[in-house]
Amino acid sequence: MKPYKTFDHTADLGLAITGASEEVLFANAAFAVFDIITDLGRVEPRETRRVLVEGDSREDLFINFLREILYLYNGERWLLKELRVITIDEKALEAEARGEPFDGRKHEICKEIKAVTYHQAQVRNTPDGWAARVIFDV
Amino acid sequence: MRVPGIIYASDKLMKVMGKDESPKQVANVAQLPGIVTHSLAMPDMHWGYGFPIGGVAAFDINDGIVSPGGVGYDINCGCRLVATNLRRDEIRPQMAKIVNALFQHVPSGVGSRGDLKLSRSEEKRVLVEGARWAVKNGYGSQGDLESMEDGGCLPGADPEAVSERALERGKDQVGTLGSGNHFLEVEIVEEIFDKAVASALGLEVGQVAVLIHSGSRGLGHQVCDDYLAKLVKHVDKIGINLPDRQLACAYIQSTEGQQYLSAMACAANYAWANRQMLMHWTGEALEKALAMGPRELGMRLVYDVCHNIAKIEEHVVDGKKMTLCVHRKGATRAFPPGHPALPQKFRKTGQPVLIPGDMGTGSYVLVGTEKAMEKTFGSTCHGAGRVLSRAAAIKASKGRSIRREMEDRGVLVMSAAKGTLAEEIPEAYKDIDEVVNVVHGAGLSRKVAKLRAVGCIKG
């Protein structure tokens, strides 16, 4: 089962993501974004990139993290296959992303995710694990 | 709320509009510092983030704010209408060829990149000069500039206010249509409501025209994103309490506010250069498909409007002249005849307003009115406005051939991505006739002509 669900927003795309721990939640969010952008079956983890993000709060950190993840494709045309969080606290995160540069002969872009919004963004630690909601501009 | 909210609608539209969170968003905008008279929404209103789509709000330049969320991600997303010498009967047998040529020649689709890759210094010139840069480089003619808001160039653009990331995203996307709701449509003038104005704009029944809908691409998105991140922190520092962080803002007179306006002007100028180049390639594609010279084809820009923008404008409020920062997020400027911001050729007619419908429906040409100046800071609607979410639209189109359905309605559609057609099905949008009749009825703009789509290129 996928660790995320989409929810309705009139013009855009809402994602509800879950994870057993905060580390897994962030890794699952990165997966969700690229699972929507492309067919991950065709992406190989050939290169490693370090992701460093800061934020003023957990939500802020989460949004800034998604900004960085989105820029990998939108700015650098690089596709993420998987991500591992190395360290995380409320205000900073260090992670390692693995993937490869976009290659039009090999990869397909299914959907463009243009930006992440603050609108109704949430990150919560619940009795059932971690959960986040976020709306993207598509 | 510092001021009341007003939503322009009909009973029929209000039934769908009230269902999402957009009325609450109108109320949220009314809480922002320096807002003048009302928080407004046009009849194509729907749920955005921060501001509603279809939202109009004006802020006092002295003690008001500017908000990137009140402009939107796609800064200066807009429309342009290009008239031709072609007649409906001439192109009917050639439609497949025309749509094919446009699809081949005009870069479109997800993350589309153009043939042109700009050096950093050249890209910065685009940001400062806008459509003038395109004209200087052989895309279109000097005369086109008169038929764009602000002559296709907002003053005050400073590329130093634009991040390296935004420049990187913009370097190879100028002259590309993009994806989502952006499109290029071949249309026929079907009905004229105001013969004198239509004739002054060079429109007559049976004539072929092209409507182009695109914006500032990845560059604009990055500018908005960069400044949202910056201003979310800034509002905490200066102690503005916001009902939604997406409404992050800065006082217009502050360094942060001025920087955003400079960067926004850069993105707006990029969008005008983009649409100018798209128009040029549209002309080339039509010439090729129809084996025609440019003179015979007779392409001429009717007008170009922006519908995601903040502009510094003079308005009369309670009998007093005020300088305001007017945010139009999914709304169109609609200045009346005689307005000093209009070039001579539109002084009698009023500013042309272009309102596209949903995919393959067609569009309306209207003109601005004095009433819009009095009631909505010279603003009107911008399109049909969504009613179904993208997910709901995909669900509704399951098992249907949208391309075939459009063909049955007489519209030939080509799309770079299969999913886009499903997301953009006609029933995902409000009825454009109903939306336009509300702004016409309320006197916010006046109907001039209706065009019907016959061909459509989607990103």
Image (cartoon, coloured by chain):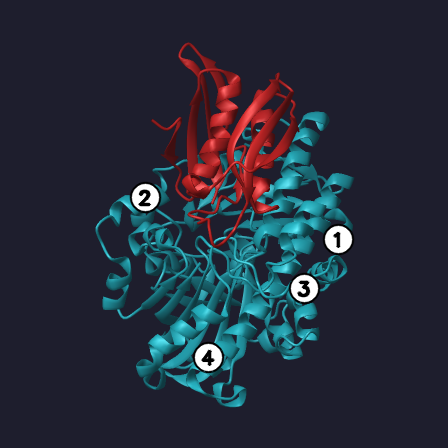
Chain colours: A red, B cyan
Determine the CA span between mark 3 and mark 2: 38 Å
Kind of residue at disc 3: Gly
Mark 4: which secondary structure?
helix
Q: Which residue is mark 3?
A: B130
* Label 2 Cα crowd, 10 Å radius (few <14 / some 14-19 / many 20+): some
Check whether the beta carbons of the residues at disc 3 and disc 2 lie within 8 A of each other. no
Mark 2: which secondary structure?
helix
Q: Mark 2 and mark 4, same subunit?
A: yes
Kind of residue at disc 4: Leu
Say whether residue B66 is visible: no
* Label 3 Cα crowd, 10 Å radius (few <14 / some 14-19 / many 20+): many
Q: Mark 4 and mark 1, same subunit?
A: yes
Subunit under mark 3: B
Instruction: Decide: is B177 above or below A56.
Output: below
Check whether the beta carbons of the residues at disc 3 and disc 4 lie within 8 A of each other. no
Where is residue A29? Give x, y as percent. Answer: 48, 29
Determine the CA span between mark 4 and mark 1: 35 Å
Instruction: State the residue in front, B51 or A100.
Output: A100
Subunit under mark 2: B
**Could you say which disc has been placed on residue B286 in the image?**
4
Q: Earlier in the sequence, mark 2 or mark 1?
A: 2
Determine the CA span between mark 3 and mark 1: 12 Å
Mark 3: which secondary structure?
loop
**Could you say which disc has been placed on residue B159 in the image?**
1
Q: Which residue is mark 2?
A: B16
Say whether residue B392 is visible: yes
Identity of the residue drawn at 33% across and 61% down: B433
**Quadrant holding the N terminus of chain B:** top right
